[in-house]
Image: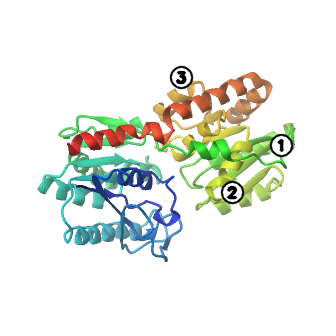
Amino acid sequence: MKKIWIVAPFTEIYNFDVRDRFQYIANELSKNEDYEVHLFTSDFIHLKKEFISDSVEDKYSFNVHLIHEKGYKKNISLSRAISHVSFAFNLMKKIKKMEKPDLIFCAYPMMTSAYLIGKFAKKNRIPFVIDVQDTWPESISSGINTDNFFVKTLMFPFTIYANKIYKLADLVFGVSQTYANRANVKGTKSKEFISVYIGAEGNKFNTVSKFKEKEEKEIWCIYIGTLSYSYDLMTLILTFNELEKINSNIKLYILGDGPDFSILKNKAEELGLLNKTVYLKGLLPYEEMVKYLKTSDIALNAIKGKALQTMTNKFGDFVSAGLPILNCCQMEEVKNIILEKELGINYIPGNTSSLKEAILFLLENKDKMVEFSKNSKKFADEKFDRKESYKIIFQKIKEILL
């Protein structure tokens, strides 16, 4: 029997939800009787900033190992870095007591754990596969201020560190081609850099119904996800303040939580928009979020100009719901997909006029809305259906283990 270790510190193991990428991969691999699958993840819930209180180890078809880390309160903080390092060292303590695996499949980031487990794999001649979820440290510096010379200088050693990690990989996957290509550094062992989008649960979108209470004349525009520095959310509030004066039936729904929740809520309240034109619903269960998506008319992929996000969870949910997308993400991969696949319109980040014009264009050209909607659903079926898109991951793992 082949042993496979999956190291994924940010796995939402407490949710018992195979929507999570690494739960899904572990679950599918464990269906093969020739594989013994072990998933190593943190006992700290990064999104909620709290520790897992209930036992989860015996509730899966694969082996779950909760690795302790110190925890932290703020995403950009020294305590977070210390917490990540504590996870890495506790992980290494754990695996030294275990029988060595035949393959290691590792999420990147965290940086320290990826580096140490990669070195362990190299020393023991174990195939090491990296799945790039985000480009640290680049995305961290973009979340602070990339124009700041001090920040750039501070981050440079971490860039070198990241390159060392990428060089350890025998094979690289990424949640976008941009992320996968970042690992293609001089001296890397990997010959392939394969994009596999995060994916979505298409069945949920086919079975969940719309909200009946939506008035027929209303137009719902929706954003889902984290409410933080990297996302161009204040522009949404300000744009809908202008749109409300033109057409009071155009509504903005913001689903999610994060450090900017109170800032956005206070601004909407100050402008007299809260629960009238702008609705902040907070973090909702997935099925309820899907219901809002199914009821909505337009998706807003609101990402700041310097942010490095690419094919995010929200993008997969937008297309799975068959929504036309208004996008301000400036990553070429995303902009090109919007244009080439005819999924919607690219607008200028931070520019209320640009977003307002895009929304009004769609409302005045309903045939384009229908066309974009059909194209979104088609793209979801082609690239975001996990049953199909993840086959390449399982095939490559099988080839390595032969």
Q: Which of marks 1 and 3 is nearer the N terminus?
A: 1
Up the image or down, 54 lies above or below 258; here it is below
Which image quadrant for residue 345? top right
User: Hey, which residue is sitting farthest front in the picture?
Assistant: 33
Q: Distance between the residues labelled 1 and 2?
A: 17 Å
Say which amino acid is labelled 3: Glu
Q: Tell me which amino acid carries mark 1.
A: Glu
Instruction: Estimate the x, y position of residue 132 in percent, counting from the top left.
Output: 36, 46
Estimate the x, y position of residue 210 in percent, counting from the top left: 75, 46
SS at mark 3 in the image: helix
Q: Residues within 10 Å of mark 1 (few under 14, many from 20)?
A: some
The residue to which callout 1 is attached is 244
Quarter holding the N terminus is bottom left
User: What residue did someone put label 2 on?
Assistant: 264
Q: Quadrant of the rendered structure where residue 242 is?
A: top right
Q: Which mark is on residue 340?
A: 3
Total numbered badges shown on the rendered structure = 3
Asked if the residues shown at circle 2 and circle 3 are in contact, with their CB atoms under 8 angstroms apart, the answer is: no
